Amino acid sequence: MSVTAIKGMNDILPGEVETWQFLEQSAREVFGLYGFAEIRTPVPEKTELFCRSIGETTDIVEKEMYTFEDKSGNSLTLRPEGTAPVMRAFIQNKLHNLDPVSKLYYLGPMFRYERPQKGRYRQFHQLGAEVLGVEDAKIDAQLLAMLHQYFVHIGIENVSLQVNSLGCPVCRPDYRQQLIDYLASRLNSLCPDCQRRYLTNPLRVLDCKAQGCKAATVDAPAVIEHLCTECDSHFSQVKGYLDQLAIPYSVNARMVRGLDYYVRTTFELVTDQLGSQNAVAAGGRYDGLVESLGGPAVPGIGFAIGLERLVLLKGEAKIAAASPQLFIAAIGAEAADRAFVLMSQLQQAGVRAEMDYLGKSLKAQMRRANKLHAAFTLIIGEEELQSGRAQLKDMSDSSQSAVELDNLAIELVAKFD
Ligand code: HAM
């Protein structure tokens, strides 16, 4: 039996990869407008990094991490998300000394041992952005404006932005206790998972998909009704700036997010087109995270977009691979040698050129030129070798013009300029 890929981990094949490249290139363009620079971190990190940042009682850390020991007995984990590694790199490389504000973006594979289904995989790709050093609500709105602009740029419109505030270490403990008291009085209606975690991670109960938990928490206290004055005013400012920038949003008071590091602003971009995997992008503020990982007291906010989900949303609007500008068909071995050198010269001059490598008949070569959607074709046989001239055929209207083989590169470069 042949070896197959690991369950929940996908190949991205030619024909699909063009959509990925378009999404990635668009991100570089749009994020560049907002002053973001790319950062690349290793795929594995010390396991401790994720336990300390994402939180010991989260689903990710409890059940979903790809954790293993290396040959020296160190516990390593394939990154399940990008924020913690970026914070680690920020602290380790003292990026705060270079600039009081760091705007960083990243793009790459993440790993979570989840049950695979449409839009949910074990290796998936995130396109993320993080801003470090700004507490002002303007940056929350800026980041959401950038996310909005990116979605407009890539032509995905059927998504909506939901925002919430999760408070801070001043106001959340009170709220948390109220929620625990509320849940304690309805314990029998909760699913076994929530009965187990309502004391350690009560906010997660609000996010549980089980019908019983949903019903039992309809009237649960909402965190935005229990914010301290500072958090309340920060959230009002975020909403005010979003209104000023004409970014559409709605407040979802039940949004809690599945990672423990969030404070204040949290948000999700959701769609109704992907079944239960409805979050295309998500993020929020994590003031305090850098400090808790041993760095300076620097506030932070960011988001990550799930690229597989974007590709699914892009759906049928496939982006075509670049087709050859010239296909050279050759008759006979000597002509094939000449065609080979000509093709290489053209490629070096910046022309996308192709030929046949399989010794096919002229008819088969022309069929291939058509299949590849070559813009021009050129046939080289004995006569063309002797005269040094050939007919360049424009495949769009079948018109022909004579060209000197020695001048081919110059002529073609001029045509495609
Ligand atoms: P997250 O909500 O865990 O947040 O993931 C962000 C996005 O990644 C999701 O909205 C989804 O589109 C995609 N995603 C997550 N898990 C999977 C999966 N198994 N398969 C396919 N796509 C998936 C974070 O990861 C935070 N680090 C975001 C953030 C950045 N917060 C602040 N800065």
Image (tube, helix red, strand yellow):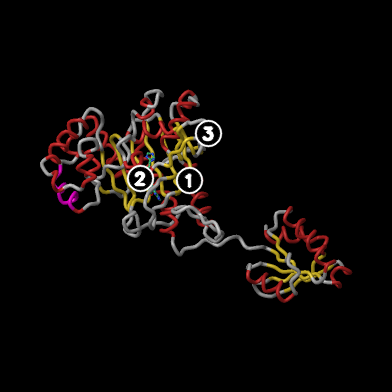
Residue 183, by quadrant, is top left
Please say whether residue 271 is one of the residues in the magenta stretch: no
Distance in Å between CA atoms under marks 3 and 2: 36 Å
Kindly tell me whether mark 2's CB lies below 8 Å from ligand 1.
Answer: yes
State yes or no: residue 217 in magenta: yes
In front: label 3 or label 2:
3
Above or below 273: residue 57: above
Query: Can you identify the residue that label 2 sits on?
Result: 282
Q: How many neighbours does mark 3 have within 10 angstroms: few (below 14), some (14-19), or many (20 or more)?
A: few
- The residue depicted at 16 percent of the width and 37 percent of the height is 180
Q: Which residue is mark 3?
A: 71
Mark pair 2, 1: CA separation: 16 Å
- Tell me the quarter of the picture where residue 176 sits: top left
Q: Return the disc, 2 or 1, that comes first in the chain's sequence.
A: 1
Above or below, 1 against 197 in this view is below
Instruction: Judge left or right: residue 152 versus residue 235.
Output: right
Q: Check the image and report above or below for 384 versus 194.
A: below
**Tag on residue 306?**
none
Q: Which residue is mark 1?
A: 109
Q: Quadrant of the C terminus?
A: bottom right
The N terminus: image quadrant = bottom right
Badge nearest the viewer, 2 or 1: 1
The magenta stretch is 212-220
